[in-house]
Amino acid sequence: MLRVVPFIFLAITNVSAFNQNSWSDEIFDIFEVEGVFSTAHIIAIERQFKEYSYNEISYNEDGSSQLRHFVIQYGAEGYHPSSIKQMDELLDEYSSITADLWIGPNKTKIDYKLIDVNLRKFDLVGMVPGTTLLNVEFNDDVRERFCLVNTCDFANNSILITNQEGSYRGYAVVGSLNSFLNEFFIYDDTISSLNFFKPSLFERLYISISNPSFAYLFFTLGFALIGLELFAMGPGIMAFLGGVLIFFSSMTFQELEVNLYGIPLFLLSFLIYIKVLSRGYFSALGVSALLLQFLSSLAMFSNYIFGENIKQTISVNITLLALVSVGLGVFYFVAIPTVIRSRLTTDNSSVASLADSSAEFISRIDSEYSLFNIKSLEIKIRHAENQKFVKNKSYEIVEKDGSLEIQ
């Protein structure tokens, strides 16, 4: 039976006898794994291993002794296969440290390698009902320990933990962290404390963009901000923010196993967008840029959509990629021109600098707008409806209500 005495009661209970154990205090460092389990979590865990001495009795200045435990609270939304390998290597490197694992508080999925008792990666393992174990290599031992009381999916090499709370051979099923600690660690003659740790701010930022969909969103947004800076010249803040987004999102590309063939396609679509914006109107070339960008996203994350990672815990929604592509197209053809018009309207000196200049006709856009060359710039200018022009002939432009028109 599990001892489900509330932990807060144990924490405030003052007992004077410590003769049953060789230490007087137990300290539990709880490392919380949230978001997508990635390299950032591994780095943070290694930092904890280097900073503290775990499972070794230490003495305070007052002569009291303490024993420090390290427990990972795994509540990740998903994981990268490379992260499981890195965690495996980290536990091998620090094999002298005995770490414990509790999978919860929410139902989640985890690679079976991390909880395999035969590999002895973690000393004690607990999990909440509803946990799914993936990539299970079924043998007689695994069947005996799990399949008699849980749901084993032999076709997909997975196990769904469905049994009631209790202790089983090699693992325990517990509904809360307190129950896990009460079951295995906390003694009636010790005063214990819980210290919760999370990755640093920079590491949490990395974790937040470790999801392929978010990485692609930030990557495209970064280029959109650079495009905005190119056409609505400012102090460079937008370009700086865009560069930061591109830098941070691309940091995750190796861990995400991004197909690099998609990057040139994306850059080509960006250049086409810039060309279309410089002409000042949407055309078939703009549609081509939109489709090419969407195809680049499919190529970049092809492993998650069509390839070997399709059965992993992290999935890429094709609809979401399409929405991001359409959203970026709207940004290019609606937001950026709106900002440009706003700049021209509020900054009369910019318009005035082009007024009374000579404009060379290039091509007609529609009945009221045509494309002209002004000081080596291709600019869309309004004119009288169905006004006739001769190609390469110069015409005078004037300022009217903050905008340019052909005289």
Image (tube, grey):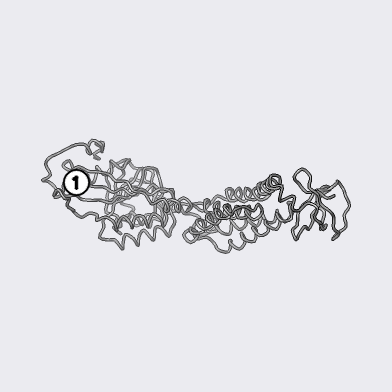
Residue 325 location (% of width, % of height)? 62, 51
Query: Which residue is found at the position 35% from the left and 43% from the top?
Result: 128
* Quadrant in which residue 227 is drawn: bottom right
At x 63%, y 56%, the residue is 293
Return the residue nearer the eye: 336 or 307: 336
Q: In the rendered view, does 157 fall on the left or right side of 4?
A: right
Counting from the top left corner in percent of width and height, residue 106 is at: 39, 43
Tell which of 214 and 396 is nearer to you: 396
Residue 191 in view, yes or no:
yes
Q: Nearer the viewer, residue 292 or 356?
A: 356
Tell me if residue 154 can be seen: no
Q: Give the quarter of the image for residue 7.
A: top left
Q: Secondary structure at mark 1?
A: strand
Q: How far across and how far down the image is residue 283, in percent? A: 74, 53
Report x, y in % for residue 267: 62, 61
Residue at 74 percent of width and 58 percent of height: 377
Whether 183 is drawn above or below 277: the answer is above
Amino acid type at mark 1: Asp
Left or right: where 24 falls relative to 39: left
Q: How many marks?
A: 1
**How many neighbours does mark 1 have within 10 angstroms: few (below 14), some (14-19), or many (20 or more)?**
many
For the N terminus, which image quadrant?
A: top left
Q: Which residue is mark 1?
A: 25
